[in-house]
Structure formats: structure tokens, C-alpha cells
Image (cartoon, rainbow, N blue to C red):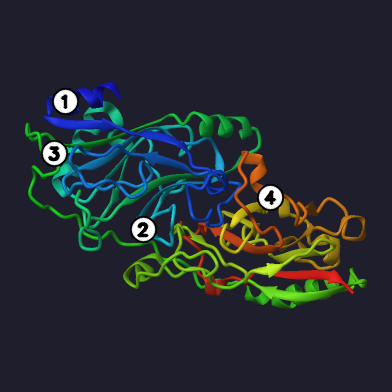
């Protein structure tokens, strides 16, 4: 770190330090800082890079989370990668609009750097020194990479491109704004505390760096445009599918219904919630929480959503489907529930490890039972399901934001489910949605 900073100064580069901190969207919603929590994954508190403004630039819309970038600037992150876990990634996104008032266009910029693609200076992806360089300028990247290599990070340097062919770099009001986030999910056994410590005090240092001009006006580029091309994207899908498992899925549904004869069952099937990032960006599709759009979807993930549905007190919902990790379609998968059509705050989530074996409650006689899950989320008390595969939900009268000492209202009776499938092992990117059996819900209300 010190070597790199000295080399920056000796090369005539200016630098400004940034910050790394957890961006708790539930809390931010309750505090009024965001228009919606936008379905955050409670199993993956997001670390967000805060960047200072360049003197004289047009103000950032969502400081310090989103930032503009001069065409010859770079964002440089140096630190240690997360501890062993099922999935981590460094995600670069672009955000158009105000996170406080919404709606926003929020899309990925290229592929994330994840735990299967990251370059480190050590023998593994985990707990190792690394560097990350975000820029759209070839000359700047080459010079910064050279300085990192001279500082001992050459083999552990990762590039993330903001391609000028797609995005408007600059520091004026018409320029695009970006957000760099870190996802950390599902520590390996024995590394739970290590991951908690990593999130609490990220061993990451981040800087915005640029060629120095010696001028009081730092908004004007020093280097002429030298645009990096749009990088190739990893291709999702292998052609293998879960679809041959559909007969067992239907059997699982029937047995779940038969297990609760005192309740009326209603089917809810999850559906595509997001367009792919680059088509959605070009179409200017917005995230308006009651109506899914592009959202902050990582290119590593498929996240089908359910329609909003009502779950009154006395009722329960059973989520069921394939465990996408068990079918080798994902490295991490989960099912999460959210409250309020607009607030979209997270209530509960279960990941693939917790879901393992849960379908045996209903289809233990089936040879492929362990490729499925069935988990109940209940407001039915003693009249509803019981056992190890049941999560009790807060009642509809719960004041959600009281836990944050605020009184912003949340409609706890209106729920939505999100199913996540992250990084197919064979392709190192999201599974193809067409290869998945879509996760499903059965909403049970008393007869």
C-alpha cells in the first residue's frame, strides 16, 4: 500500500482516499435515505465503496455511494479478499437517478470479479492480497497496473472496465454515476466469525487516482481519450437443465397441499424479474419496486421474483423447488421473503445449505429428494406447520422500522419472494433462466 502511494506521487498522480462500509438497505429505507430497500439479500450485507468528489465537479446524486469518474481517472482498491465462502464478488454498477426518491436505472457494468475469477498474489482466492482497477482509459490502466506491479501486486491485479462506448465518463451533470459493491455470502464452516470481522472492518483501501495537472481545475482530463473496448461477457448456460425433474416437483406440490387439509392452497410461480443489464440499460428500464425492472442485478445472478401477494395473520406460505446448488446450476442459491410492495424490506431468507434435506418432509421416498427443498414461512402459530423447516414470520401488525428507532411505515401484510441462483460452476456466471425449474410458492389460508 505504502509503496503504491509513493509511486503514485512520484509519477505525478493525484489521489483521494475513499471508504468501505456496509450499506444496510433495510436501515436506509427506515431512515428515509432510500425510496426502497429493493429486495436486499439479508445473507449478504453489501459493502459499498464511498468516493469523495473532485473539487469543482458536478455534485454526485447519491454521495458517497455513487460517483462520477473523469475519463482519465481510475478507482483503485487494494486489500485482502474475503475468507472462504460459497460466493463473493466485486460488482461494478451504474445508477441513474436518486436512490432517495426513485425510481432508478441500476445495472451491471460488465461481469463481476468473483471468487472463481479473482486474481490474487496467493495460492487461493480467499484471504489473499489483491488489487482492483476500475477505469475506461487504456493509458491510465497501463500506468496504474505498472505501479501496482512494481509494488508487488502484479499477479494479483484485476481490471474492471467502464467502456466509453456504453457509458459517459466525466464530471459534469450529464455524466454517468457508478457504484462499486462487494457481496459476501455463506462462509465455509469455521469461517463465520472471520466473515463477520471482514464485514465489520473491511481490510480494503480504495483511492480515486488521476494524472496530476498542476491546475486548480481538476475536472479537466490531462490525458486525451484512450477508450478501453467493451470486454467480452461470460456466457450463461451449458445446455444442461433441471427440467427432467419436473415430475418430482409436481409430486412435491401435491404432497405439500395434502399435508395441510384445513387450509386453502393458492399457487404462486416466480417469474423473470429483471432484464439482462445491457439490454435493460439501453431501454432505460427502471427499478420501481412494485413493478420489477432492471434493478441492481449482478451479471452473476438469476433472481426470479414472485408477484406481490397477501399473507394475513393465521396463514402461511410454503416455498418449494429445486436446490440449484444440488443440481449444479449455481454455487449459491436462496429463497427470501420481503414486505411491502414499495419498501421491499427483507424479512427472512434461507440459503441452499439450510434448505438441504427439507423436501424429505414430503418426498422422502423419491430418489432425487435431495435435489429439492420445501420451507414454510408461517403466521399461523400452533395451527400451522411445525418442525425444523419452518420460519415464524412477524405478524402483520409489527412495526418493522421500530428496530431502527424510526416510524416509517411498512405494509407487513404484502409480501414478495425472490429466488437467487448465483454463479453456475461450469460457466462462472449466472445460470440460464431457461435451464431452471422456477421456484414456487403455495399460499395457505384457513378454509
Judge depth for marks 4 and 1 and give the one in front: 1
Look at discs 4 and 3 and give the one toward the viewer: 3
Res 9 label? 1
Where residue 218 is drawn, which disc sits there?
Answer: 3
- As drawn, the label of residue 353 is 4
> Residue 410: x percent and y percent?
64, 55
The quarter of the displayed image where residue 106 is located: bottom left
Count neighbours of disc 4 (C-alpha within 10 A) and say few if under 14, some if 14 to 19, many if 20 or more.
some
Q: Distance of mark 4 from mark 2, alpha carbons?
A: 37 Å
Residue 307 lies, with reference to residue 222, above or below; the image says below
Q: Residues within 10 Å of mark 3 (few under 14, many from 20)?
A: some
Question: Which image quadrant: the N terminus?
Answer: top left
Is 65 displayed left or right of 336 in the figure?
Answer: left
Q: Separation of disc 4 and disc 1 at Cα?
A: 48 Å
The tag earlier along the polypeptide, 4 or 1, is: 1
**SS category of the residue bearing label 2:** loop
| Element type where label 3 sits in the image | loop
Whole-angstrom CA distance, mark 2 to mark 3, is 25 Å
**Dot 1 alpha-carbon crowd within 10 angstroms: few under 14, some 14 to 19, many 20 or more:** few
Crowd class of label 2 (few under 14; some 14 to 19; many from 20; radius 10 Å): some
Amino acid at each position: 500500500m505504502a509503496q503504491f502511494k509513493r509511486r503514485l506521487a512520484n509519477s505525478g498522480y493525484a489521489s483521494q482516499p475513499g471508504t468501505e462500509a456496509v450499506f444496510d438497505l433495510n436501515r436506509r429505507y427506515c431512515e428515509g435515505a432510500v425510496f426502497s430497500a429493493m429486495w436486499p439479500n439479508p445473507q449478504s450485507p453489501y459493502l459499498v465503496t464511498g468516493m469523495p468528489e473532485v473539487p469543482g465537479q458536478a455534485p454526485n446524486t447519491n454521495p458517497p455511494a455513487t460517483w462520477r469518474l473523469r475519463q482519465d481517472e481510475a478507482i483503485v482498491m487494494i486489500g485482502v479478499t474475503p475468507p472462504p465462502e460459497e460466493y463473493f464478488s466485486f460488482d461494478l454498477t451504474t445508477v441513474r437517478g436518486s436512490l432517495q426518491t426513485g425510481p432508478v436505472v441500476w445495472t451491471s457494468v460488465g461481469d463481476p470479479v468473483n471468487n472463481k475469477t479473482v486474481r490474487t498474489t496467493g495460492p487461493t482466492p480467499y484471504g489473499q492480497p489483491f488489487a482492483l482497477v476500475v477505469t475506461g482509459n487504456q493509458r491510465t490502466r497501463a500506468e496504474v497496473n505498472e505501479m501496482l506491479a512494481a509494488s508487488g501486486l502484479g499477479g494479483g491485479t484485476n481490471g474492471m472496465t467502464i467502456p466509453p462506448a456504453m457509458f459517459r465518463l466525466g464530471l459534469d451533470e450529464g455524466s454517468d454515476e457508478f457504484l462499486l459493491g462487494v457481496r459476501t455470502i455463506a462462509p465455509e464452516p469455521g469461517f463465520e466469525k472471520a466473515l463477520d470481522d471482514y464485514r465489520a472492518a473491511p481490510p480494503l483501501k480504495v483511492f480515486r487516482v488521476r494524472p496530476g495537472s498542476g491546475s486548480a481545475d481538476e475536472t479537466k482530463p490531462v490525458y486525451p481519450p484512450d477508450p478501453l473496448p467493451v470486454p467480452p461477457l461470460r456466457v450463461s448456460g451449458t445446455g444442461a437443465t433441471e427440467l427432467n425433474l419436473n415430475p418430482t416437483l409436481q409430486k412435491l406440490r401435491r404432497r405439500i397441499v395434502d399435508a395441510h387439509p384445513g387450509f386453502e392452497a393458492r399457487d404462486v410461480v416466480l417469474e423473470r424479474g429483471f432484464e439482462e443489464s445491457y439490454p435493460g440499460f439501453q431501454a432505460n428500464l427502471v427499478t420501481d419496486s412494485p413493478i420489477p425492472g432492471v434493478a441492481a442485478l449482478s451479471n452473476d445472478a438469476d433472481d426470479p421474483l414472485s408477484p406481490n401477494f397477501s399473507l394475513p395473520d393465521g396463514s402461511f406460505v410454503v416455498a418449494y423447488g429445486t436446490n440449484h446448488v444440488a443440481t449444479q446450476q449455481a454455487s449459491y442459491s436462496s429463497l427470501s421473503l420481503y414486505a411491502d410492495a414499495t419498501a421491499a424490506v427483507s424479512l427472512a431468507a434461507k440459503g441452499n445449505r439450510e434448505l438441504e434435506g427439507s423436501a424429505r418432509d414430503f418426498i422422502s421416498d423419491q430418489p432425487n429428494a435431495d435435489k429439492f427443498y420445501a420451507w414454510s414461512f408461517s403466521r399461523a402459530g400452533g395451527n400451522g406447520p411445525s418442525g425444523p423447516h419452518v420460519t415464524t414470520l412477524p405478524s402483520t401488525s409489527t412495526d418493522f422500522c421500530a428496530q431502527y428507532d424510526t416510524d416509517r411505515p411498512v405494509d407487513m401484510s404484502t409480501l414478495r419472494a425472490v429466488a437467487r441462483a448465483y454463479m453456475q460452476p461450469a460457466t462462472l456466471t449466472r445460470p440460464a433462466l431457461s435451464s431452471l425449474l422456477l421456484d414456487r410458492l403455495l399460499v395457505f389460508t384457513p378454509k
